[in-house]
Image (spheres, rainbow, N blue to C red):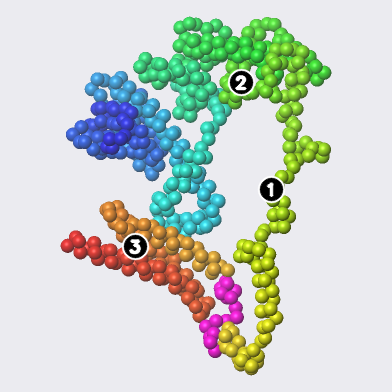
Amino acid sequence: MSRSEDILLTVKHVKHKKSEGTLYMMGSRMGWMLASKDTFNISLNYVDIKVQKVSPDTKEKVQLQVVMHDGGATTFHFVNPAGRAVQVKDREGIKELLQQLLPKCRRKINSELEEKNRMLQDDPELFQLYKDLVVSGVISPDEFWASRVNKVKEATTTNTQDIGISAAFLADVKPEADGCNGLKYNLTADIIQSIFKTYPAVKLKHTEYVPEKLTEQEFWTRFFQSHYFHRDRINTSSKDLFFECAKADDIVIRSEIDKPMLNPFTDLSAMSDSTLSEGYGTLSRDMPAGSSHSSNASLIKRFNQHSTMILRATEVRTVNGSNKHGNDNGHIPSAKKACIREKVEYNDLQPKNESIQGPALRLTHPDRYLQGPTPLIATQYHTSEEILSACQATTQEIMGWRPNLPNVLSASSAVGVLGELSPGGALMQGCTSQQLDQMVPKDIQQELRQLYIALCELLRHFWACFPATSKSLEEKVVKMNGTLERFKSAKLQPFKERIHSFHFNFDLVGHMDEMLQAAYQKYNAWYTKRSAKKL
């Protein structure tokens, strides 16, 4: 076991296949070790675990089974000599910790898979390379993504975003009857995190009570039985574990009400339905008195408290940077209009005012601005007389040039040389007037390009193994050599046979053969040297 791993939980007296040992829970894996050993006999990564199962209470043995994604399963039997109650407690501790760790690892794997899928969709060449090498079985997916693991990790870390909480997440926690006039809630790590984000007071209580005073199961049982969860309950008791949470929420909402009303549309003190402003629809109508008034007020207060936390998170600012209209009822309609105007009007979409003049253009050297770049000849001569003298000399040289016609080729010789140097001539027997891309069909060109890219990818893995200074690199060299041979027989050779039917007088795959031959020579030299060292 690595010394850098943090052990989250240790449970002794755990059997696996009739052998007793200790079960360890760490940050990224769980391990089981025999009492007489110092290394793990079983090591299971959380990312490879699909689901966990526990034995029913009617069964004599207290067991926990871990089912893997590949279909395998590992069963642990808890045999603490203190009795069945302690055995169940040990198993529940492992089960609850797994419930928290598995979703985190699963989200990480899902995000990596999504990023890999996005990379394949955005890059057709990479997708074709994946099909040529991975889908055809030339290399494994891990080898394919090994050289791109940094890009995948970088993309998953930069693209990660905190997911919002659904307003009905608690409604999705549907209780199930346990057969004894009771209800059973199945909580996942995502639901627990949503509860903590929505109700910070519950998170504080969880930190305070679990696991010193209450177990995870006892804490959530009290939460779902409390007045804090069932807000429609009017009568509360001070014995309720979450009674202080409700009082803390009342203090928060009261402090928000006492603050100046920065946004005219968020009046937390209003307990009645009202319209936008005077002249729009009906006037405000007070809530009818009756027995439902208190329950309705409690429900409205609950929604107001939730809205307050959202407003705090978004850090709402005042309209136009001013909060002077806070509780002045005479200015609220105008403040509402200003707030609406701010949402629907954009400065950059307003009609341009032609009378507004832009800043004046200030030029240090107007001559450079009007005349453009300085001629190159001005950098060679410093005075205008030198420039004029150079221009006159050039003009005289041009005027004095005379063609030397007697020393040039004759017309018949020139035509003959041109014919010999043209495609199909005596000196150009291997060429034709057609371009190579016109002679080779498009599908052959595309397949040749894909083969070349795939071969370069394999050779990159092969040459990256040198120098083979470790046993793992030596094993990879041998494996990659076999991969190159399979690629040659499964991909390159059928392509050669196909283009042979076109009867081309040039070699399209000669360069790839040379690349493979260089890799084979390197492997043979390395293998010979390695065998000599072993002798």
Q: Which callout, 1 or 2, points at the residue further toward the start of the chain?
A: 2
Write the residue at 62% across / 11% down: 258
The quadrant of the picture occupied by the C terminus is: bottom left
User: Which residue is at the far left?
Assistant: 535
Residue under the point 25% across and 39% down: 41
Q: Report, in whole angstroms, how far the alpha carbon at label 1 lies from the one at label 3.
A: 68 Å
Q: Residue at x 32, y 31 (%)?
A: 6
Q: Nearer the viewer, residue 521 or 190?
A: 521
Q: Position of residue 248 (x, y in %)?
A: 52, 12
Q: Amino acid at mark 2?
A: Ser
Does any portion of residue 18 appear in the rendered image? no
Q: Which residue is mark 2?
A: 307
Closer to the camera, 30 or 232? 30
The amino acid sitting under disc 3 is Asn
Instruction: Find residue 481 and name its label.
Output: 3
- Nearest to the eye among marks 1 and 3: give it: 1
Residue interval drawn in magenta = 426-441
Label count reads 3
Residue at image coords 40%, 21% = 216
Secondary element type, mark 3: helix
Relative placement, left or right, of 185 versus 316 is left
Q: Is residue 295 magenta?
A: no
For label 1, the residue is 364
Q: Which mark is residue 427?
A: none
Q: Is residue 200 left or right of residue 405?
A: left
Q: Which circle's residue, 2 or 3, is located before the other in the chain?
A: 2
